[in-house]
Amino acid sequence: MKKLLFTLLGALLACSAAQAQIGIKGGVNAAVLDGQDINQNTNYQFSYHAGLFYVYNVVGPLSIRPELLYSVQGSDFKNAQEDYATKLQYVNLPILLDLKLSKLHLQAGPQFGVLLTAKQAGTAFLGLDPASQQATYGSVSKDVKEQYNSKDFSLCAGLELELTAGLRIGGRFNAGLTDIANYKDVRSANDPQLKNRVIQAYAAFQLGK
């Protein structure tokens, strides 16, 4: 994993020396896990993202914009038996088309994510009682990475506004297409299918002109 991160970071820095313009960005996430057969209320939780980007001009107002981001996502889950938060930490690589309209940029494209950690805390399902085969619940604070797929694929769309001296602000919506649930302890044939949904607001600073 560390080798992958350093490779991607090195690629970004190398590209900045050519026709690319490198920058840094960071902001707020409002993240939720949505999908099918979720027998719980899922609520947005607030976290953050940060990382690097570069802009490579293709022709006229059209550019390609890869980014390398650390992003904290997940969801709050609640029903009559369970009330817990799941936090998922990702390294995300969005590859966006950027269309510049004066100072406004329209952006869209795919995003590839690699799961780093998954934590669960609160009151949650513990397992089946061996004698009665009834579900048991209790307080948890544990690693649940084995319950989630290590890779995620999303589609992104957003807007970005140039302010002054390289400073930008923007907003983006990331819609996950991958079912990231990977339950080892199957509770039923209708275990939930979970997909990342993330709304982002951020500030960015682009180096160079």
Image (cartoon, rainbow, N blue to C red):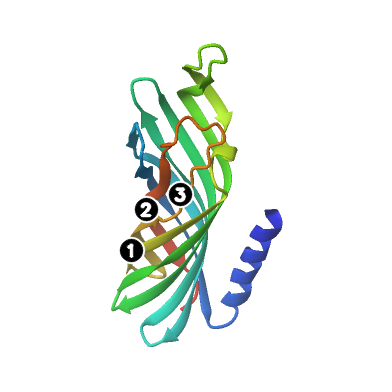
Crowdedness near tag 3: few (<14), some (14–19) or many (≥20) residues, C-alpha within 10 Å? many
The residue at which mark 2 appears reads as: 200
* Amino acid identity at mark 1: Gly
Q: Whole-percent x and y of residue 11?
A: 63, 70
1 vs 3, front mark:
3
Q: Whole-percent x and y of residue 188?
A: 45, 32
* Amino acid identity at mark 2: Gln
Q: Whole-percent x and y of residue 55?
A: 47, 75
Left or right of 8, for residue 121: left
User: Which residue is at 47% across, 35% downward?
Assistant: 86
For marks 1 and 3, give the CA distance: 23 Å
Q: Dot 1: what SS?
A: strand
User: Which residue is at 34% across, 25% downward?
Assistant: 79
Q: Which sits earlier in the primary sequence, circle 2 or circle 1? A: 1
Which residue is at the far bottom? 59
The residue at which mark 1 appears reads as: 158
For marks 2 and 3, give the CA distance: 21 Å
Q: Nearer the viewer, residue 148 or 135?
A: 135
Crowdedness near tag 2: few (<14), some (14–19) or many (≥20) residues, C-alpha within 10 Å? many
Q: Are marks 1 and 3 in contact (CB under 8 Å)?
A: no
Q: Is residue 92 above or below residue 146?
A: below
The residue at which mark 3 appears reads as: 179
Q: Whole-percent x and y of residue 21?
A: 50, 75
* Amino acid identity at mark 3: Asp
For marks 2 and 1, give the CA distance: 9 Å
Q: Are marks 2 and 1 in contact (CB under 8 Å)?
A: yes
Q: Is residue 198 above or below residue 56?
A: above
Using the rendered view, name the quadrant where residue 3 is placed: bottom right
